[in-house]
Amino acid sequence: MDFEIKEAYYLHITQRCCKFCAMKKLILISIFSIFIFTVLPAEANVFVQNQERSGFNEPDRFELNIYPNPTETGRITLEMNNEEIQEIRLINITGKEVLLRKMEFGTPKYLLSLENIPNGIYFVRVKTTGNKTVVKKLVVASR
């Protein structure tokens, strides 16, 4: 039994006369699966989403910084290093949107007041002027 890994990352098995072919196929598929999930670059953890899909590109290299996190002051600073913030959404752990701020003009840094926001875990969803979306976790602690 011969096998080769094609460019599109699929396993091609050529069967030759062999007594335990089914077992060998199972072992090869297991090894191939381990190879795919451990060796090849995983892009499942990318939190940056480009909403205009023009092809397969490198992951975007920009960050959203939120500080202080966890916050006890009722105010946080959101800062982008290479993009400008256009919209901020605060979503609670159940998925309900509890706050929305839209900017008329993009800004790389924004001070957000969390008055009347109860303690808990939230997701801050930021949309940039470049039509990208970044999601980060925020913890609001006792004040």
Image (cartoon, grey):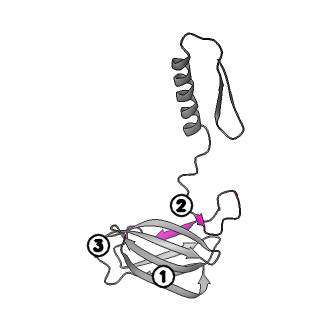
Callouts 1 and 3 close, C-beta under 8 Å: no
What's under tag 2, amino acid-wise? Phe
Number of the label disc, if any, that sits on residue 47? 2
Residue 64 occupies quadrant:
bottom right
Q: Is residue 68 visible?
A: no
Callouts 3 and 2 close, C-beta under 8 Å: no
Q: Is residue 72 left or right of residue 18?
A: left
Number of the label disc, if any, that sits on residue 111? 1
Residue 63 is covered by the magenta coloring: yes
Residue at position x 58%, y 47% in the image: 42
Q: Of 123 and 31, which appears nearest the observer? A: 31
Residue ranking furthest to the top: 19
Number of the label disc, if any, that sits on residue 99? none
| Mark 2 or mark 1, whichever is nearer to me | 2
Q: Gap in Å between the C-alphas at discs 1 and 3?
A: 19 Å
What percent of the width, then of the height, locates residue 101? 47, 84
What percent of the width, then of the height, locates residue 87? 53, 80
Tag 2's secondary structure?
loop
101 to 131, vertically: above or below? below
Q: Of 132 and 5, which appears nearest the observer? A: 5
**Stretch of the chain drawn in magenta:** 49-72
Q: Quarter of the image for the N terminus: give it.
A: top right
The residue that disc 3 covers is 119
Packing grade of label 1 (10 A; few <14, some 14-19, many >=20) is few
Q: Quarter of the image for the C terminus: give it.
A: bottom left
Q: Gap in Å between the C-alphas at discs 2 and 1?
A: 22 Å
Residue 71 is covered by the magenta coloring: yes
- Decide which of tag 2 and tag 1 comes sooner along the chain: 2
Packing grade of label 3 (10 A; few <14, some 14-19, many >=20) is some
What's under tag 1, amino acid-wise? Leu
| Mark 1 or mark 3, whichever is nearer to me | 3
